[in-house]
Amino acid sequence: MARVGRRQVSIWRKARKSLGPWAYIAPAGIIMAVISFFPQAFQIWMAFTNFTVKNLRFNVFNPDTWAKYAPSAVGFDNFVRIIKSDLPISTYDFGRILGWNLSWTFINLIFHVSLGIAIAMALNSRRVFFRRFYRAMFVIPWALPAYVSALTWANMFNKDFGAVNQLFHTNIDWLGQGSVAGPFGGILSWLPWAAYAVIIANIWLGWPFMMVVATGALQSIPHELYEASRIDGASGWQQFRFVTMPLIRPAMVPAIMLGSIWTFNQFNVIYFISRGGPLGRTEILITQAFKLVYENQLYGVAGAFSIVTFFILLIITLIQNRVTRATESYDLA
Amino acid sequence: MTLRSFFGKEPKVRSPWRPKDILKQVALQVFLLMVLALVLFPVVWIVSMAIDPRNISKPLELTLIPPGASLAAFKKVLFEPFALLCSTPGDPQSCMKFSGLLANSLLLSLGTAVFAVGLGASAAYAFSRFKFIGRQAGMLGFIFLLMMPSTGLLAPLFVLLSQIKVAGEPLRSTLLGLAIAYSAGALPFAVWNLKGYFDTVPKELEEAALVDGASTFTTFFRIILPLSTPAMAVTVLFSFMTGWTEFILAWNFLSKPSRFTLAMALRSMQGQFTTPWSEFAAMSILMSIPIIVMFFALQRWIVSGLTIGSVKG
Amino acid sequence: MMFAKRGALIAVVAVFALVVAACGGTSTTTTEAGGGTTTTAAMSSTTTEAMGSTTTEAMADLTGTIQLWHAWKDAEIESLNEVIAGFQALHPNVTFDVLYVPFDDLQNKVTTEWSTGTGPSVLIGATDWASSFLDADLIYDMKGMISQDVLDTINPAALSAVDYNGVYAGLPETLKGVVMFRNKTLVPDAPATFDDILAAGNASLERGFFFSMANLVTACGGQVADENGMPAFNTDAGVCWLELLNQYPSPTYNTDDDVDTFKAGQSGIVIDGTWNIGALSEAIGADNLAIDAWPATENGAMSGVVQTESIYISNNTTDADLDASKAFVEYFLSPEAQKILSDSTKAAHIPAVSGVEVTDPLLAGAVSAFSGGIAQPRFGGCYWGNMDTALNSYFGGEATAQEALQNAADIIGNAVTANECS
């Protein structure tokens, strides 16, 4: 008798309990399905059509608009054109954009991480006067809205009246949209002055984040480890390599992964400082996608571009995952 | 934050000052001062532009405090109406002022933050704690959304939000609709980050509470959320910043000057051919202050909110 | 306890924000168009029936709301407001809803809004947006809308710029373009030939494609585009043109550094647009500024492109709003309104119609400079970026003149054929 009763009670309780998860998901789920998933699905559909301005009038629920405004499916045509650099934009070159985007991310990350760690270590020394003041000030580049920083740097890099040229008494045309000349020849000749300008600006923007992460990680390393290694006769550099580096690694790795995605998609710095110029030499994938929507109104091609960017980002993330996992097990061993 | 804590109470280091220590300290200070100069240089530049009364297209000389420095640009931006953002032509009273723009910006940013946190936290909790049909698919979906760029969403979002009508006008042309559009972009990251953080909260705490008779809802509010303050802080900060500084979608969606935001006003100051740099700089500084304040207030949570959450990803 | 309070607080804030946002969104319905049309419609129909429709009575009975969007700034807006006031004096029952949108955002905003059935009734915007609007079926053909009398007064070259196979996609409402400015204190006499400019030694000339393309036609006898909009610069005349540009003193390319130098009083001659008349007058003094006739070259004369700015009527506009919009466009193109717009202390717009007296010497100089100018190429969207690339590769020494021009001609030709010019 009692056993049957208990089982019945537990079924009721299970049913009532499972209302819980659905109550949490339902509002969020429905709203997100509509505002997050649906537009993306729409964009994916557009990627396989020749969607442009006139197709905006196309309304699935209104059959009158079908004949006149429906976009026509073009299969993988958009993708092929993107990769073969066959778009009506004279400065467009997919290979070059991708190559620059990857180099840009890599160069920035190297500077961000090394500067961040170096300065975090300097501030973590045993005795530093005004330590907290410095720490507070150094966060400012990260705290300022990126749009404001980008425009300030654009102003500073102006050829005749910018702060940079005035400070160094140079007359470099940093942001000129005219020529693609750069400071170095040979292997670096494909980088125009504007590339250096945006790299400098982005380094300024990006290292505080790494510094803050590194500071947190450094503070968790017990002093005794350093004492012990010094007693064992380790030099400063060896201490860094064998004590500091492995112990800040768990914190730095996720920060690097985040930072690389942020840098890869750094729209503000590129768009508002060099505008992707000169002649598309500093264009990255995300600024090109934006221009396709905003300036050329080729919505279908832009959708295909987004999908291509997605796959590239996916591949990069997977590679990063593999590399960190591989080196991690090596360290622990 | 008191002045003393800002400048740092040095921990008591008992060893005496040796010459080597003095040298090290001097070298350190020199290095840090150099870094400080590089960090603050653009900030000083923009402040100097804002107090420059000449307001010429670009400043001609490198001067720290320009001759005749004045706060006129700040006064103009703060108290005078923005001549370009008027509801009725020719009537200065109908033009937006800083206070009105500020109110709209606050509304929009807070609304976006509330949406992102509210929807994000509840969805993240469900994904973190419950096993339900479609959980795997949902997680994959979020990773997908995270990495898809949102630049091409302008047209779909525009059309979508124009279909929904609120009180006779499309949702799109209201601040609410804009907040929804911003949340659409902010939610994937918010859910992913919050879920990662919730995963680190030990299940034993909730189980103990459930045994004591608390409902799922109570455990969510009283145990999980308070322990996840860092990740929530990050979500609030990032979504607030989006609402505060975004202008491209804003200019595309909104058409009534009474709803315009600070970011839109800043964009309108950029001329097609010339820009009034003093006012532009003054406006930029004023707009940046709340963000910087928020940043410092939430600083100690931001790093842990970002990194612990993303380790699992 | 603390947690419950926090939870409650969050909930309250959330609800509050939602409520305020929703309220904030709907609070401005009072000034909507709905109020204007209904009240006077009944009255106007009875009066016209009773008194027979004399033109002034019918005109005064215009109702409706005109939603006007533009990207004009400060000084220009003052003139715009005067024109609106002038129109409202004639038609007091028409209400206006004017919105400024930053130029870079205007085309996109208008396109998306018109496509979903909202947006302005009248738009003042760039002429080269016309092809994209027409293609997307967003605007009316002005030929059927505006009376022929008004159309006949419009500058023919300007009108040809908006003529797409007989369809008038918007109408030109002002001329502007590239002219040569001179600082009278630095260069006392107008340069009669290109060599005079070189001799003066203090010129800073802009050779960006937009600022220099007219020389291809007037100085070298070539063509930028043919009647179908296809590139036609790929000839010896094109090479002549590039070589002329190569001789420009202190050349700049698509920056306003030359303008800044001129404003600072450090250069005496600059090539720029008439939209900068106000700024340049303010910088060096209106009395010291002059616009001269274009100097002669070996085989012709230099010149600048003559642009128009267009006024469009959206084809979402109907009934009373449409009547009001048509009347407004006609008023905008009347000598009275054009004279208001040519006020050199405000908009300083050069009239697009004949019959307007221009007293200001600078504007008169511009008008005479425009007599030797050319209209900008159709499908401009395909030309700007590609020509900039070509010119830069030539100036940067990466390609010969022929190669650069050939390259550009191929890309532009394909784009125009594929109809992908925005």
Image (cartoon, rainbow, N blue to C red):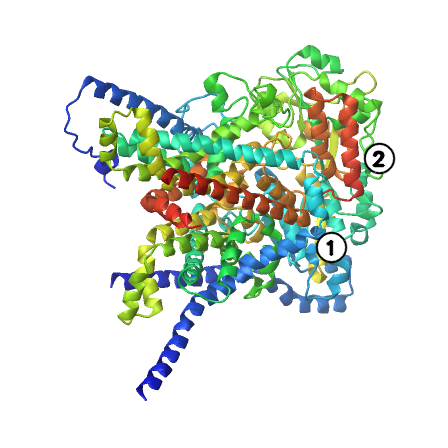
Given the current orientation, which residue lies at the most extreme top position?
Answer: C199
Q: What element carries label 2?
A: loop
Residue type highlighted by circle 2: Asp
- Disc sitting over residue A73 in the figure: 1
**Residue at image mark 2:** C226
- Disc sitting over residue A258 in the figure: none
Of B35 and C138, which appears nearest the observer? B35
Given the current orientation, which residue lies at the most extreme bottom position?
Answer: A1
Count all numbered tags in the image, as a single digit: 2
Question: In the drawing, does residue A177 fall left or right of residue C26?
Answer: right
Visible in this render: residue C88?
no
Question: In the drawing, does residue B1 fall left or right of residue C346?
Answer: left
Q: Is B276 rendered above or below residue A162? A: below
Visible in this render: residue B127?
yes
Q: How crowded is mark 2: few (under 14 residues within 10 Å), some or many (20 or more)?
A: few
Percent across and percent down for residue B304 are 35, 46
Percent across and percent down for residue A12 are 38, 80
Chain for mark 2?
Answer: C
Residue type highlighted by circle 1: Ala
Q: Is C236 rendered above or below residue B249? A: above
> Image point 64% across, 24% down: which residue?
A179
Chain for mark 1?
Answer: A
Residue B202 found in image quarter? bottom left
Q: What element carries label 1?
A: loop
Q: In which quarter of the image is the N terminus of chain B?
A: top left
Of badges 2 and 1, the one in the foreground is: 1
Given the current orientation, which residue lies at the most extreme front position?
Answer: A333
How far apart marks 2 and 1 lie (CA) works out to 33 Å
Percent across and percent down for residue A110 are 46, 31
Q: Is C46 rendered above or below residue C89? A: below
